[in-house]
Amino acid sequence: MSLASPTLAPPPAKTAVAPAPPGRPHTRLLALDGLRLVAALMVCLYHYAGRGGVVSASWHQNPDLAFPTLSGAAGYGCLGVEFFFVISGFVICMSSWGRSLGDFFRSRVARLYPAYWFALLLVTGASLVLPAVVHAVRPDEFLVNLTMLQQPMGVPRVLGVCWTLWVEVRFYALFALTVVLPGVTYRRVVLFCSVWTLAAVLSTAAGGPWTELVVMPGYAPYFIGGLALYLVHRFDGRLLPWGIVAVSWILGLRMATQGLWRAGAPRDPYVVMLVVTLAFAAVAAVAAGWTRRANWPWLTTAGALTYPFYLVHEHLGWFVIRVLHRAWGLPPWPTLAVTVLGMLGLAWLIHRFVEKPFGPRLKRALTCA
């Protein structure tokens, strides 16, 4: 089977082959917005009820005592990150099609940084009010956090969840330099997925910090699976992208199960595999067009809330839990519900008053730079 998309017959007056048809055009997939919020809520429940550590101090007990039935399930919410990465692969492939490298760069910067900067200010402010929940960083460390490069610089993170942004940034760089720069095509995306899969497998066998940094074998299968699922969507279910999805799913099962066992968490590997499978299946349902009827307008709002909610929910949520539960004596379940709804409300405010006005301005400023 050829990797290239089908070509049209050349015009009689020319000998060059005409460009391949672009496949299904880019249309907004509202179900994907809903899935993004589901992934964010999974991570949120993990941070509030599925782990110990700092959140135990906010609840004044381990969450498994506060939520005997919920805590076990919430412990698998950390896999929402892998779910995010599958969705990210799909969305990045979709949004980069037909764009130049400059357009891709500007869209990513305008999308990521305004809400991120505002979240840094909020959490840093909270660290001054309640350092037991959020430890303050030095001014130089805060400034490095503004760049989103704190991890490679060895600087403490202001936002606990921002380690995933560093993973995303490396994925963007790989995809931009090898696929977006020469121009996104079916053939290039397939080649990128194939080479990255091979590199991830070899990196797992050989090890080494540089291969880990660039190739990201622990996360590559999820991004690759998402990229291939967009090819499935755009090119009407061709067999080769489905094959890439299948290989990525298999490798993703292994990476997720092995990673959680290395972390020493008492999680059932079969449940881990089930959650990863459901993540791939959910995005596959969107790719195959099975969610076309999910066109409710509120899904657009859900997608818009996801990123700011993900940024602020962890440390600020622990702050709210401590106030509601320990200071005001609100029972655990109402505290959990109010905290989640409060963080969603804060996310809406950030989207409405930070992302919407400042994202386009930043993009225009970068265009003129």
Image: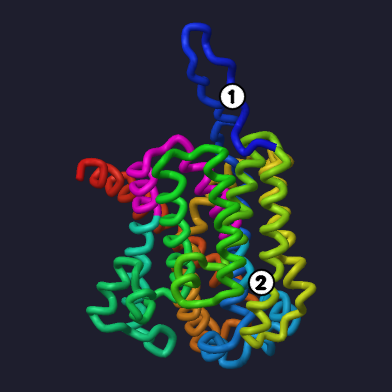
Q: Which stretch is magenta?
A: 85-111
Where is residue 11 shown, x and y percent of the image? Answer: 52, 10
Please state if 356 lies on the left or on the right of 256 as rendered: left
10, above or below 35, in the image: above
In the image, what residue occupies the spot 60% across and 52% down? 194
Say whether residue 61 is left or right of residue 321. Answer: right
Q: Can residue 107 be found in the magenta stretch?
A: yes
Q: Residues within 10 Å of mark 2 (few under 14, many from 20)?
A: many
Name the one closer to the observer, 162 or 309. Answer: 162
Of callouts 2 and 1, the N-terminal one: 1
Q: Is residue 173 visible?
A: yes
Specify the quadrant that holds the C terminus. Answer: top left
Tell which of 101 and 129 is nearer to you. Answer: 101
- Name the spot of residue 96 as percent of width and height, x first: 46, 42
The answer to whether residue 278 is above or below residue 185 is: below
Q: Which residue is mark 2?
A: 256
Instruction: Give the residue type at disc 1.
Output: Thr
Residue at the disc numbered 1? 7
Q: Colour scheme in the image?
A: rainbow
Asked if 203 appears above or below 14 in the picture, the reply is below
Q: Is residue 231 left or right of residue 290?
A: left
Is residue 101 one of those drawn in magenta?
yes
> If the image is split into quadrants, where does the N terminus sit?
top right
For label 1, count other residues whose C-alpha is less than 10 Å away and answer few (under 14), some (14-19) or many (20+).
few
Q: Which residue is outermost to the front?
A: 15
Q: CA distance from mark 2 to mark 1?
A: 39 Å
Looking at the rendered structure, the secondary structure element under dot 2 is: helix
Most frequent secondary structure within the magenta stretch: helix
